[in-house]
Image (tube, rainbow, N blue to C red):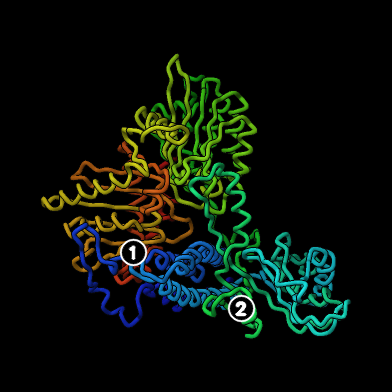
Amino acid sequence: MTAPIRHSAKTDDLSNHYQDKDKSQQSTLTQLDWQRFADGSYSSNSYIHRDLSLLQFHIRVLAQAASPRHPLLERLFFLIIFSSNMDEFFEIRVAGIMQKLSLGDVPSSPHGMRPSEILNEISRTAHEAIDEQYRILNEDILPALADEDIRYLKRDELSPEQSAWMKRYFIEQVSPVLTPISIDPAHPFPRLVNKSLNFIATLEGKDAFGRDINLAIVPAPRSLPRVIRLPDELTGGKEHHIMLSAVIHEHVGELFPGMNVTGCHQFRLTRNADLDLADDVDDIAKALEGELENRRFGDKVRLEVTTDCPAHISDYLLNEFELHDNQLYRVNGPVNLTRLLFDFNIPALRYQPFTRIVPKAFRREADKFDQGISMFAAMRRGDVLVHHPFYAFSPIINLLWQAANDPKVLAIKQTLYRSGTNSEIVKALAAAARNGKEVTAVIELRARFDEASNIAVANFLQEAGAVVVYGIVGYKTHAKLMLIVRRENDRIRRYVHLGTGNYHAANAKVYTDYGLFSADPDISEDVHKIFQELTGMGKPANLKKLLHAPFTLHEQLMRFIDVEIEHAEAGRRAHIIVKANALTERRLIAKLYDASQAGVKIELILRSMCCLRPQVQGLSENITVRSIVGRFLEHTRIYYFYNDGDERLYCGSADWMDRNLFHRVEVAFPIEDKKLFTQIHQDGLINYLQDNVQAWTLSGDGTWHQLHPKAGETPHVAQKHLLKVINHVER
């Protein structure tokens, strides 16, 4: 029986902690002193800083690791996700604030905080959160894993036989790829790769050349596994493991023969990993390849050491890296928990698997028009909706393969943001090109941390004969679009797929996203025009049904909100529901404040960042904000406007952020089929507004509070509900 993991009050405290102001000011924030200016904007204290809000999301993820609602190995996974999230937070967000500080410690809009204030608040909160992370690891998860006989053994816990095996492993597998580097006048401190595991060793004695060297650095190559499973014959087939750091630490003396190792301490350096491409580059791919190398050695932003690292060693490292004390993080365990994950095949300790559904529309009888089972026939009959991960990703792949092998298909065009070189999507596009189809792939090379993979995809498709373009310089292509052109009885018909998520099969198993298959002539024509924008030149396309950034999306959203304001001011019902990953764009927030004051009911379901302050008297009392954190990563973007009964509902690729609305190519598509409209409204919006288990609500003072069912109230978990209802609907 697995020992229960308690939900720590400390974790709740972190999640509920207000991140924008000094604690002494918290009591006044529910009566926020806000001001509206003549230009329609609001005073700075009407906004929450986006990076402090993002940090709060990471803490909500951390809380899942302590929650008994999740299976044990999933709790470990949440802990690792938190670690990975924090890595990126420091690499991108903290690094960016540090760059602003270097240019001057001046307040920036809309929040009015100085970079130094933000960094100090981040440091304080991040230190508390990371301390709590390791407390959960050491006091909750590792003991519970041990109860299941899953162990990460320490050096002093090994049997003599296991210790002997570890020494052989070090000699045969580890030592040959280690390169100890002494610190002396001829060997300055080495340039260490971002987030690499390293050891600093203190030494006594003389080396082979008679030198007195007292410090050395031992980088751990990334080719070595960080978690090593002990052989079955030494464990009785049990899941017993040792960390690479323990192997190196135990035998580090072997690297310095004739010298005495007086100390060995692991550390990890985090660097700025953001890329900086000029808008006037001649070749994005070549420029990006150069920047990828620079990412490994960007400016230093964080130093991690273990709790037993002596102060004089950590001070030495801080001085070497030119970091301050508040950029030092002492951790009670491995300095990189993202490498702690091991592929345990223990189903009882994971989420229960489920069968992903293929829509009934794609499972019907053979199509008379094509003399076979045809997805094109299903799309001619009407729009088809998929809701990942509850629905399978296979229909998207099958449609492409069908198009690649169909002699009637003339052309395929697709945007690719994250896909991977082993993707069936990419293979199908390559096959289509080899089969003589006109294949055009708009590949966004700058998808963060997938740049190298996307360059490889681009090269692979070009070699297959596809036309590859990289979108528009200065604007990331984030829209999720597929267009298939087919000749049918001497006429041209277009088929499209539009989505809220990437064309990535693995992501589709853990991200919630909507995808729409359609042969609607107007929507298909709009998609055709957008591809012309992306590959050619000319003025913005005049679209009939789609909204697209950076041209019409923001303007239309503002207009839709204005319409709700008009209805509310006329005494009619007015209602807005938005589900997205983030809300940070200042003008939309100001317009939502205006709508609240006019009496519009506004319900926001936001996964991560929210710069809007809800439930503030006179400002936003008609606005509620909630966040759902659960088994799947919420990723759907849905915009709903009541519109006096003539309801509007759009799905899209864009969050309500400056970057999405003004600096990316994004598409929002209307849901016009009444049945699909009802399905998305009920499953994707109302269902999430009813969640009282995995939902967190935001207060006007910036604190997040997890909901719990009230006495007599039935628990409702939105994601679990969808697992049931979608299986029932598609039978």
Comparing 236 with 76, the one in front is 76
Taking the image as shown, residue 419 lies to the left or right of residue 713, namely: right
Relative vertical location of residue 8 with respect to residue 287 in this rendering, above or below: below
Three-letter amino acid code at disc 1?
Ser
Comparing 392 with 442, the one in front is 442
Direction left: furthest residue = 570
The picture quadrant where one finds residue 520 is top left
**Label total for image:** 2
The N terminus: image quadrant: bottom right
Circle 1 residue: 109
Q: Residue at x 37, y 43 (%)?
A: 549
Circle 2 residue: 319
Does residue 727 appear anywhere in the picture?
Answer: no
Q: Residue at x 55, y 44 (%)?
A: 284
The picture quadrant where one finds residue 649 is top left
**Where's residue 327, x and y in %?**
54, 75
The picture quadrant where one finds residue 148 is bottom right
Three-letter amino acid code at disc 2?
Asn
**Where's residue 275, x and y in %?**
54, 55
Taking the image as shown, residue 460 lies to the left or right of residue 544, namely: right
Does residue 431 appear anywhere in the picture?
Answer: yes
The C terminus: image quadrant: top left
Relative vertical location of residue 588 with respect to residue 375 in this rendering, above or below: below
Comparing 319 with 165, the one in front is 319
Q: Earlier in the sequence, mark 2 or mark 1?
A: 1
